[in-house]
Image: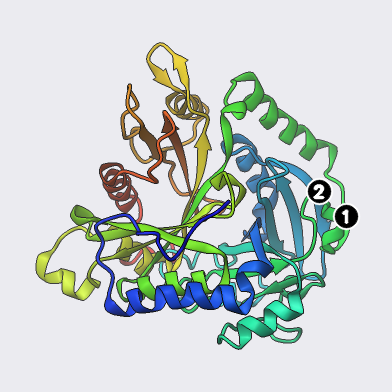
């Protein structure tokens, strides 16, 4: 796909600083001249970690709430891993859990710093893995640009230094990692995660039951794949987070919009090298427009910065695209999926927002935070081939709803 970065004008009404406007084209040019743009491909996997005792419950939850299905599980030296797929052309999902609840590495250390993350110290979205052609060359190139990588002995979790995988250290701005790999994530045995372990008959029966629910209710065929991944950061680190990410992957800054009522902006980055975002999902960064101490003058809602102060810089939600279409009786497909999940007991933060009538538009909704992953699942239907990424009214409503569910009550952190 041909895409001219030099002539592209980002969408939106969010004004960026002179610093951002100076370095964005420089990063694009360096990415091309240094070979990073040619060496890095599309997103091949997303990785998250959960508590030791909820790995299987997380798989069941993913069966109910997403198109992902279990492919294989492995026992490594420090962690157990489960690999799931939704479509061969879309990123795999790797869920890992430490074998011991007292396992120590970056994740529990950073989680303990934040009041609403302390009770689940092992639970955190890790990051994405992108296809790469030559790990050694890519590493040297990016290290010359001051990107740091993990080496054997640097981290307690050997996953980050497996052969055929190369991970950055956690970002100072997002706490997410970027990984690169030459491996085939559809061939899970090639990943070197450890000894393959089989599910018990009882575990397989639970997954089969969850899969049957999706098939019998007709919602699983409507869930397509990951549309975008949204990280929340602090107000002063928004531009740094975007530029750092764009240094490492062949994405472009699609645009940013102010969500004035929520004192925030939504900043979208997309991969121009794919014909479908689900093949390499968009990366969204959300941040306050002004830091919390300045907002104390205006006293507007600030759920984005509250989230970061309560949970830390981290992924906030994973969005699943729903097949566009009318289900019947005035329902769009996303309404049908959400109502079916509600009947199954899945909690949501608010009603579906947005309208899809005769004109291109969006309908979307947030689930409540998963007790297993701490992530919100968003369901989004892009009606009539809507070519924008989001609508400001929808984002404002979703942000407000999430903010009500992410409050920190003093004195209850260790309950």
Between 34 and 219, the residue placed more toward the observer is: 34
Q: Which comes sooner in the sequence, label 2 or label 1?
A: 2
Q: Quadrant of the C terminus?
A: bottom left
Which residue occupies the extreme left position in the image?
297
Identify the residue shown where x is 72% and y is 47%.
84
Identify the residue shown where x is 24% and y is 73%.
291
Where is residue 273? Give x, y as percent.
58, 54
Residue count near mark 2 (Cα–Cα under 10 Å), binned few <14, some 14–19, many ≥20: some
Where is residue 12? Give x, y as percent.
29, 55
Identify the residue shown where x is 50% and y is 50%.
228
Which residue occupies the extreme top position in the image?
329
Residue count near mark 1 (Cα–Cα under 10 Å), binned few <14, some 14–19, many ≥20: some
User: Is the residue 193 above or below the residue 341 in the image?
Assistant: below
User: Is the residue 310 above or below the residue 401 in the image?
Assistant: below
The reply to whether dot 2 and dot 1 touch (C-beta < 8 Å) is: yes
Task: Residue 393: name its quadrant.
Answer: top left
Between 132 and 346, the residue placed more toward the observer is: 132
User: Is the residue 105 above or below the residue 251 in the image?
Assistant: below
Task: Residue 304: name its quadrant.
Answer: bottom left
Which residue occupies the extreme right position in the image?
195
Say the numbered circle drawn on residue 72.
Answer: 2
Disc 1: which residue: 196
Where is residue 321? Give x, y as percent.
51, 38
Cα separation between marks 2 and 1: 7 Å
Asked whether the viewer can see residue 111, the reply is no
């Amino acid at each position: 796909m041909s895409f001219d970065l030099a002539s592209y004008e980002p969408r939106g009404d969010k004004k960026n600083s002179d610093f951002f406007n100076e370095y964005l084209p420089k990063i694009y040019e360096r990415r091309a001249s240094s070979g990073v743009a040619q060496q890095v491909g599309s997103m091949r996997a997303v990785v998250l970690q959960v508590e030791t005792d909820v790995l299987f419950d997380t798989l069941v939850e993913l069966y109910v709430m997403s198109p992902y299905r279990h492919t294989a599980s492995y026992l490594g030296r420090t962690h157990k891993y489960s690999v799931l797929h939704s479509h061969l052309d879309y990123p795999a999902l790797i869920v890992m859990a430490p074998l011991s609840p007292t396992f120590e590495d970056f994740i529990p250390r950073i989680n303990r710093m934040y009041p609403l993350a302390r009770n689940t110290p092992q639970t955190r979205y890790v990051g994405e893995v992108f296809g790469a052609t030559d790990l050694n060359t890519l590493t040297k190139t990016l290290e010359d640009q001051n990107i740091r990588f993990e080496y054997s002995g640097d981290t307690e979790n050997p996953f980050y230094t497996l052969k055929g995988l190369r991970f950055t250290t956690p970002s100072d701005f997002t706490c997410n990692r970027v990984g690169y790999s030459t491996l085939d994530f559809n061939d899970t045995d090639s990943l070197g995660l450890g000894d393959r372990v089989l599910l018990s008959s009882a575990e397989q029966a639970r997954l089969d039951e969850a899969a049957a629910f999706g098939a019998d209710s007709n919602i699983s065929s409507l869930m397509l794949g990951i549309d975008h991944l949204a990280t929340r950061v602090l107000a002063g680190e928004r531009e740094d987070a975007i530029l750092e990410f764009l240094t490492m992957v062949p994405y472009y800054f699609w645009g940013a919009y102010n969500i004035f009522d929520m004192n925030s902006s939504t900043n979208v980055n997309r991969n121009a090298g794919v014909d479908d975002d689900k093949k390499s999902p968009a990366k969204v960064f959300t941040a306050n427009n002004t830091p919390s101490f300045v907002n104390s003058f205006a006293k507007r809602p600030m759920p984005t910065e509250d989230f970061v102060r309560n949970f830390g810089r981290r992924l906030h939600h994973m969005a699943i695209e729903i097949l566009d279409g009318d289900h019947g009786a005035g329902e769009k497909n996303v309404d049908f999926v959400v109502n079916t999940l509600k009947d199954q007991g899945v909690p949501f933060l608010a009603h579906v927002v947005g309208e899809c009538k005769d004109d291109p538009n969006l309908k979307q909704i947030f689930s409540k935070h998963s007790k297993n992953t701490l992530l919100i699942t968003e369901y989004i239907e892009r009606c009539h081939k809507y070519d924008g990424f989001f609508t400001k009214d929808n984002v404002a409503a979703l942000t407000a709803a999430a903010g009500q569910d992410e409050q920190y009550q003093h004195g209850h952190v260790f309950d």
